Image (cartoon, rainbow, N blue to C red):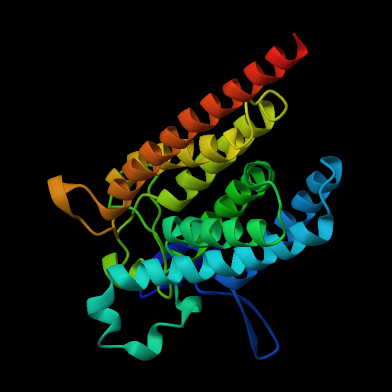
Amino acid sequence: MLWIEKDGSKFMWFPGPVLFRIGSIPINTLGAAVALATLLGLWIVNREAGRQGIHADYLTEFAVYCVLGGVAGARLWFVLFMWSYYAAHPAEIFMIWMGGLAIQGGILGGILTGIRLAKKHRLPVWQVADIVAPPLILGMAIGRISDFLTGDAYGIPSRSFLAVQYPPGTFVYNVFGSTPVLPMPLFEAIGDLIILGMLLLIKYKKPFQGFLFLLMLELYSVLRFVLEFWRGDSLRTVLNLKVAQLTALATILIAIGFMIGCYRQTKGHRRKLRSREN
C-alpha cells in the first residue's frame, strides 16, 4: 500500500481528480472511469444483442448516445441542485472533470435518450432496456470506484475502522481536511456489483420484458436511499430527507407501477394466445 506524508501527517495514497499523467498530459480519473465503463458496456451490449437477434449496429449507436445523454443528465441534475454556486461561477458548469455528476440524473438522461433512439429505430423498448440493465449497473459501480479514488461523493466523518483519511488534493479534503470519513462510494460500488450478480442470476428467468431493468432501478434506489444516511455531501429537503432519497422513493414507486403494468400486459397477451390455440 502506498502512503504519502503532508504537513507531518501520513495519508493513504489516492490519485485525486488526475489519475496519472502521460508527459504533461493529465489523464482524468473520472474520464478514465467513463471511458472504461463505456467500452465494457458496448462489449456486453453487442454480445447480448447478437444473442437476442437484434442488429448490433443499432445498439452500438444506442449505447453511445445513452452514455452521452447520461453524462449530460448527470451534470444537469447536479448543477440544478447546486445552482446558487454555479450561478456565481458559470464557467465551471461544463468542468465535469472537477467532479459533480449525479447518478440519478444520469439514469434519467440515459433513459430519455434510450427511449427516443429505440423508437427511432423501432427497437423493442423493454427488451433493449433489459439488455442494457447489467452493463448500466456495472458502469455505475465503475463510476463510484472513480469517486472513491477522487474523494468525491464522500461520507460523514467517522471513527470507524472503515473510515478513510484522504490526502490534500482530493475533493473531500477541501471539506473535512484530514478527518477520516466513511468511503460511501466504495460501499455503493460493492452494492452495485451485488445487484449485477442478482440480475445475471435471473437473466433467463425473468417473467416479462423489462423486468431486469425495472428490478435494477428498484434495487439501486433502495441501496441509494439507505446509503444516503451516511453521505456527507448531499442536500437535505423535506422531512430531513435528502434530495437523492426522495428521488429514490419516487423511482421505486414508478418502477413498481411499470412492473405491475408490464406483468398485466404480458399475462393478458398469454391469455389471448391460449384462447386462440383452443
Residue 141, image x and y in percent?
56, 50
Number of dots carrying numbers: 0
Query: Which residue appears at 59% of the width and 70% of the height?
Result: 68
Residue 79, image x and y in percent?
35, 73
Residue 196, image x and y in percent?
61, 38
Residue 126, image x and y in percent?
62, 42
Tell me if I can see residue 1 in this picture: no
**199 up-or-down from 59: above or below:** above
Q: Residue furthest left?
A: 239
Q: Is residue 207 left or right of residue 147?
A: right
**188 up-or-down from 146: above or below:** above
Please state, as top left, top right, bottom left or bottom right, where the C terminus lies in the image: top right
Residue toward you, 45 or 187:
45
Query: Which residue appears at 48% of the width and 77% of the height?
Result: 96
Residue toward you, 254 or 45:
254
Please state, as top left, top right, bottom left or bottom right, where the N terminus lies in the image: bottom right
Q: Is residue 35 left or right of residue 215?
A: right
Residue toward you, 149 or 198:
198
Residue toward you, 56 or 8:
56
Tell me if I can see residue 261 in this picture: yes
Query: Which residue appears at 28% of the width and 44% of the height?
Result: 229
Query: Which residue appears at 24% of the width and 59% of the height?
Result: 235
Q: Residue furthest top?
A: 278
